[in-house]
Amino acid sequence: VPIVDCNNRVFCVASPPPSNEDWKDVNAEAASALERERDGSPQHQGLKLNEVHRRGRFCPRNKRSVAVYAGMCRFIFTVSTAKAVKRLLSNKSFVRIAGHALAIFATWAPKLYQFYADYMDKITENNPSIYFNFSNSIFAAATFNFGPQTVAVEDLDHLNYIYGWCGITALGEYDYTKGGHLILWDLRMVIEFPPGWTILIPSSYLRHGNTAIAPDEKRFSFTQYTSGSLFRYAD
């Protein structure tokens, strides 16, 4: 489902999961993996996460990213609770979700996708030690929001590439007709966001957030994006 501007240019896309019968299992396993890492299991201790931060009141994002910060001509791997993130990045459900988001990106914004691909190739050619989170994705960063009720307040991802897209996948169990909607404040739009769906938006300049869900419901999210600093570094 594309969203277009006055010149009929696509700048946001909302996509259902693939029609494969097992995709409901992908949503369920991804959500369960986030809960296991957050709460702990017999194999490992749970994460200690502060539930209050600038994006809302929920267990915040743990991420792995490739980024370049001001004054540093080198790459910084931002790794929080590295073992947990490594397990999530190797989880087959998240690998499939990452690939699906990239397929949406390549289908609806092929020129922007190729622009990303060319720049990421420049970066890896210059520094072969750099590797990205998923072999089937060219986004340089991934974020996991652990819930139990991931509902973001109005926000801008100001460090992301200004013209780029951010892929957001909703996970969990909630009535998407009553809550968990994606709010695009600048467009005055409220979009139903069912579990398992992926929405790509230009998150660095389009203010976004979510509506609340019921107290007994669960909602998580997984996002992919690329820092604008990487493009400047490549130039």
Image (spheres, helix red, strand yellow):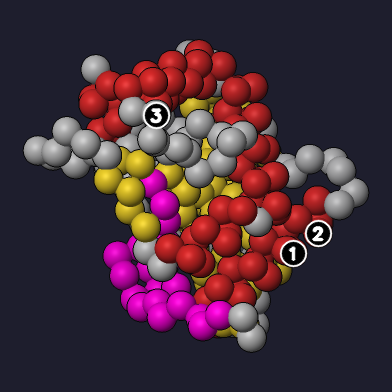
Left or right: where does residue 101 sit relative to residue 45?
right
74, above or below 39, in the image: above
| Residues at discs 1 and 2 in contact (Cβ within 8 Å) | yes
* Image location (x, y in percent) of residue 135: 59, 36
Taking depth in this image into account, of 8 and 230 the one nearest to the observer is 230
SS for callout 2: helix
The residue at 74%/64% (across/down) is 28
Rounded to the nearest whole Å, what is the CA distance between mark 2 and mark 3?
Answer: 35 Å
Q: Viewer-proximal residue, 75 or 5?
A: 75
Residue 99: give x, y in percent of width and height: 65, 37
- Whether residue 83 is visible to the viewer of this picture, yes or no, is yes
Query: Which stretch is magenta?
Result: 44-65
Q: Residue at x 19, y 41 (%)?
A: 69
Residue lying farthest to the left in this orientation: 71
Is residue 168 in the magenta section? Answer: no
Find disc 2 in the rendering and name its residue: 25
Residue type at the position of mark 1: Ala
Q: Which residue is mark 1?
A: 28
Where's the C terminus, which quadrant?
Answer: top left
The amino acid sitting under disc 2 is Asp
Give the residue at mark 3: 128
